Amino acid sequence: MNAAAVALLAFAALLLAYFTYGRFIARRLYRLDPNRRTPAHELEDGVDYVPTRVPVLFGHHFASIAGLGPILGPAIAVIWGWLPAVLWVVIGCIFIGAVHDLGALTVSLRFKGRTIGDVCQDLMGPRARLLALLIIFFLLALAMGAFVNAISGLFVDFNPDAIIPSFGLMLVAMGVGISVYKLKVGLGPATAAGLVLFALLILCGVKWPVPTYQWLTSTETCQALETARDTKPAGDVPGFEKPYGAVAAMKHLEAIGNEAAAEDIERALPATKKRWIFALLAYAFLASVLPVWLLLQPRDYINSFQLYFALATLLVGLLIASAVGAPESQIDAAMFRPDVPLRPLEAGETLASVPKAPSWLPLLFVTIACGAVSGFHSLVSSGTTVRQLNRETDAMLIGYGAMLTEGALAILVIVACVAGLGSEAWESGAYASWSGIKGGGLQAQLSAVVHGGSNFLAMLGLPTKYGSALLAVTIVAFALTTLDTATRLLRFNVEAICRSVRLDFLANRYFGSLVAVVAIAFFGLVPAGRTLWILFGTTNQLLAGLTLLTISVFLYKLSRPIRYTIVPMVLMLAMSVWAMEVSLVGFWKNPDLSPFNKWSLTAVTLVVLAMSLWLIVEGLLSFARGRGGLDFGEEPEQVPAEELREIDSADLG
Amino acid sequence: MKPPVSVILIRENAEQLTGGGCCGTLDDDDPTVRGRGVFQHARKQQQELGLLHRTIREFFPTDGEEARVAVVTVDPRNQLYLIAKLLGDVLRYRPGLSAGLRTALQMFSLPAVVLNGRVISRRDRPLDPDTLCHQIRELLSERQRPSV
């Protein structure tokens, strides 16, 4: 099967949906009216409320919603075959994710640009707000736990070449921050210098990878690795070349018969990764207390270029691969693989004789969260975006369209994993079994995106070693930005929860930061990478469920049909609860988990399950309160035609 | 029909732009972030340029059918739009080689004001609304002169 054909078909379906189902939802359900005054016009102050043209707002909104989520989730889910992943992304985006994003935008629009959290409290009461805070707490802690787990593994197992550029990028970002905000250097020169330094850092990373696992191995193993360095693959013996990842080292040493050295490395891996996790947590703590202008905001400039560059080059690379008939254009993965072995098959073993990985149903629906539907988008949609909408109907492209574009990003990731990697990944590599390579966690899937994507970049003439480092650093940069943000948000969240339950004496930054870092550390140190991701996906879908419930209550009170939002909500809740049940069974069957981890993960799952039930009760209570109570005027207030034309004309030049 | 006078106000929103996405984003108006002053510097710039925005809207309201002044506020991190907009204005209004290069290469400090493809804000000196209105008025009077 041709990968470009699959991608283009999926894009066509998304585009078609925009003009059909999207329009239907916008016109008939949300009743977007181009003549109704938006908060941007009604409250125009040039500060928060600024009528803005669609192209400006679309770029802004898309950059805000696209993160690591739509990359990691699809990369894990393709293990069940490429077709279910593609179908879920396309169908989920069209019928759930985009409806959710547009709904959040519409509700916020009608409430004069107030955030969905505030509206949720108004429509369903303060308990619903506390529920949202709790869901967000678990969501952030789980996601960050999964990220630190994946990044530490990526640094050690596959991409030691990403270490120098990833940490160097922080210094570059700080330099850009000081130049732009304090020294008032021109924006263009500062950003250009930042990007040039970033490119140089990648060159340095490729030239001087840092295989940190060697720091914890014996002198003999180090000597063996020194001797083996830069060995090219020969016959059945895999090479040991840059970036000198631990997995490559072990494979090479085993193939040449140096079992002792390979075992020594395997023993050193957990401790090395643990040290990286602590280093990342220390970074998160420090970054979250630094002023945002110094690191977080300047990194935005570099991150946005990375995002668009990676998207564009992956797409063009795929199209070129297809045009020239390169092997990377053909999908090597199975279309549908319901039975995935839990561990790699030993010699003589068959699929029937080994334990199976958890079933794709329901896990697919929570594994791919952000690429198909993401609860967090409601927070972005109801913030800046809604206060800048020039016309109500612009919400369709911004809310519905941007989510479909994120779906397209997820499709590119799927294609990179199922075609860009080559068949070896499915026979003996990252996707051969649920436990991945050498029992590797999420890093195996991140590495799959990196290596699959770098093969597409090679179509543009960029050598794979540089493409691989570039993509790895891009992913790590996004993860580190998220880590910084999430630690800060967790701190605020803990303070808000403490105030909600009247424990004001605990609502201070030190307690908040401590709880934030401990929560991330707890999840990051649990040796259950994929399960962690599934719990994150479940919680994210719960937040989406809460938003869909808010939208449904809003529609119900206006006596409009609610089936288009309530059915997705029920589906998301059902899949989330089912996935939690599967996860619980998984914890108890996992031999790598200690009793403490089993019990604590069970407790977390039960808390998330309790929140799901709470969500259902809140929904029932809200509907029981009956229709009515909302009035947005029968006759929409008209925006003067010339005022709209004035905003339009801003973009004509 | 002559093109309207183009004003681009470039300043950051008080929020994080990239990297958050599905897993949390910092927005000055999020209920948990609100009132903490996380984005104080960006908020100050927003307010400074908000004043310019309101002044333009007040003093140059739309005149009948034709929009005379087109004002757009852009976050500089939204480079996808900003690059195209700045280049478009430079090509359309032709402010001269050095001014055009300065604009196109974004050789201005934040916050910035670009009027008909020319950067008119200065480093460390917030633009005065009167000065901006005066410059816009000059451009409008030039615009009204019949072309030879």
Image (spheres, rainbow, N blue to C red):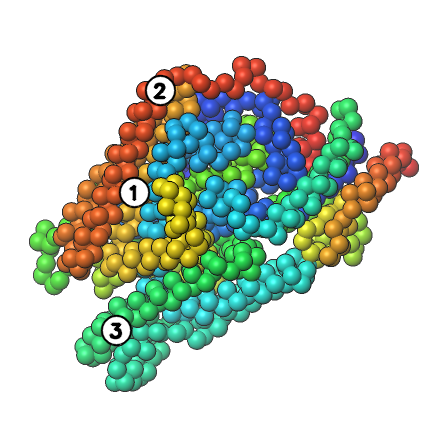
* Label ID, residue A625: 2
Q: Which of A93 and A586 is in front in this view?
A: A586
Q: Distance between the residues labelled 2 and 3?
A: 60 Å
The answer to whether residue A357 is visible is no
Question: Mark 1 or mark 2, which has the lower sequence index?
Answer: 1
Q: Name the residue under label 3.
A: A268
Q: Where is residue A406 shown, x and y percent of the image? A: 44, 43
Horizontal side, residue B5 vs residue B142: left or right? left
**As drawn, is A535 to the left or to the right of A184?**
left
Above or below: residue B140 compared with residue A257: above
Q: Where is residue A567 shown, x and y percent of the image?
A: 32, 27
Q: Position of residue A252 (x, y in %)?
A: 26, 74
SS at circle 1: helix
Residue identified by numbered label 1: A538
Quarter in which the C terminus of chain A is drawn: top right
The residue type indicated by label 1 comes to: Thr
**Above/below status of A37 relative to B121:** above
Counting residues from the start of the chain, the first of labels 1 and 3 encountered is 3
The amino acid beneath tag 3 is Ala
Looking at the image, which residue is at 48% across and 73% down? A204
